[in-house]
Image (spheres, rainbow, N blue to C red):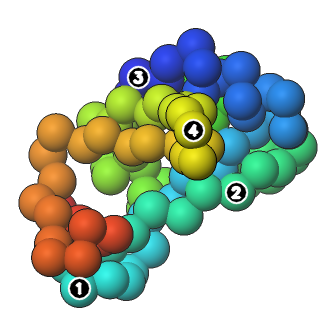
Amino acid sequence: MIITQSAKDEILKNAKFLRIIATPGGCAGFQYELSYTNESGNNIVLEECIITDQVSKQFIDPITLDFVEELGRKEFVIANPNKKTCGCGNSFAA
């Protein structure tokens, strides 16, 4: 996993960790869910500020996480070189 400095800065402004999990959904089969948390719990720590569960780890390892702040747009962007996108653009197949 690669995390950009802008993503790391945004996470640490809001919480200790960003939890990223892959859940069933969308038209292609999976989608990423992101949430801030201050506790790692039973999650796996992938980077100093990223956690996930054991099942999602395989979908998280190859990603690059960035944070983009532009006029009218402020969001995390996930780039996964292994994913096959769907028609809606909000989910992926592994």
Q: Is mark 1 on a helix, strand or loop?
A: loop
What residue does disc 4 label?
A: 71
Instruction: Determine crowd level at label 1: few under 14, some 14-19, many 20+ residues with C-alpha closer than 10 A.
Output: some
Q: Distance between the residues labelled 2 and 4?
A: 23 Å
> Counting other residues with Cα less than 10 Å from the Cα at mark 3, is it few (<14), some (14-19), or many (20 or more)?
some
Q: Which of marks 2 and 4 is nearer the N terminus?
A: 2
State the residue at coordinates (85%, 29%).
13
Q: Which residue is drawn at 60% across and 20% down?
A: 6
- Give the residue pinned by disc 1: 27
- Kindly tell me whether residue 29 is visible in this rendering: no
Residue at 60 percent of width and 57 percent of height = 34
- Which residue, given by chain and number where applicable, does mark 3 sit on? 2
Q: Can you say whether 94 is above or below 75 in the image?
A: below
Q: In which quarter of the image is the C terminus?
A: bottom left
Q: Is mark 3 on a helix, strand or loop?
A: strand
Q: Which residue is label 2 attached to?
A: 35
Mark 4: which amino acid? Leu
Local secondary structure at mark 2: strand
Q: Does 38 sit left or right of 26 as displayed? A: right
Tell me which amino acid carries mark 2.
Answer: Ser
- 30 left or right of 38 in image: left
Pick whichever, 46 or 10, lies toward us.
Answer: 10
Distance from Cα at disc 1 to Cα at disc 4: 29 Å
Occupied quadrant, residue 44: top right
Distance from Cα at disc 3 to Cα at disc 1: 26 Å
Q: Which of marks 2 and 3 is nearer the N terminus?
A: 3
